[in-house]
Amino acid sequence: MRKNKVEALRWLKQAEYNLRVAESNFKEGFHFASCFMSEQSAQLALKAYIIYRTGRYTTFHSIEKLAEECFKYSKEFEKIVGYGRILDRYYIPTRYPDALAPPAIPAETYTEKDAKEALDFTKEIVEVVSRRIRGDRK
């Protein structure tokens, strides 16, 4: 097995665990936490694919930018760029009250609809990356 694949699988495995946490938070009604963990899962999955393709780590966190990087290697990531625009909104404001207009706090701001959409997008991202890495489809 290629060294890049071994490392990419580590990142993908963590992305899959993060997705399970996002699903658990969703079921418990913690929509803000589900949105954040969906974002984290998607971010790690896309980074896994970049590691798989290039052997390098990325230092940026934008899912949109990560998806654009992945798109350079596979057209399958084209619509994921659009998902990134939405998922990127869940990186900071789902955690920090000062990222929202007072008196809002993350725990009371994000809805079931937000969390469901984030989960759906993330599941697709993880599936695409998993197929490409585990199936050795570049």
Image (spheres, helix red, strand yellow):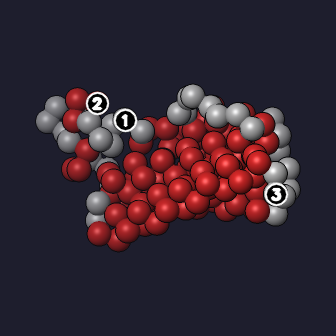
Reply above or below: 112 against 58: below
Residue beneath label 1, please? 92
Q: Nearer the viewer, mark 2 or mark 3?
A: 3
Q: Answer left or right for 7 relative to 113.
A: right
Q: Answer left or right for 64 relative to 114.
A: right
Res. 20 visible in picture: yes
Q: Amino acid at mark 1?
A: Ile
Q: Position of residue 77 (x, y in %)?
A: 74, 46
Residue beneath label 2, please? 99
Q: Nearer the viewer, mark 3 or mark 1?
A: 3
Q: Position of residue 51 (x, y in %)?
A: 71, 41
Res. 129 visible in picture: no
Residue 1, label in figure: 3
Q: Amino acid at mark 2?
A: Ala
Whichever of labels 2 and 1 marks the residue nearer the N terminus, that label is 1
Viewer-closest of 80 and 16:
16
Whichever of labels 2 and 3 marks the residue nearer the N terminus, that label is 3
Secondary structure of residue under mark 2: helix
Q: Answer left or right for 83 relative to 74.
A: left
Q: Position of residue 95 (x, y in %)?
A: 29, 41
Do labels 2 and 1 touch, CB within 8 Å? Answer: yes
Q: Amino acid at mark 3?
A: Met
Secondary structure of residue under mark 1: loop
Identify the residue at image location x=67%, y=49%: 7
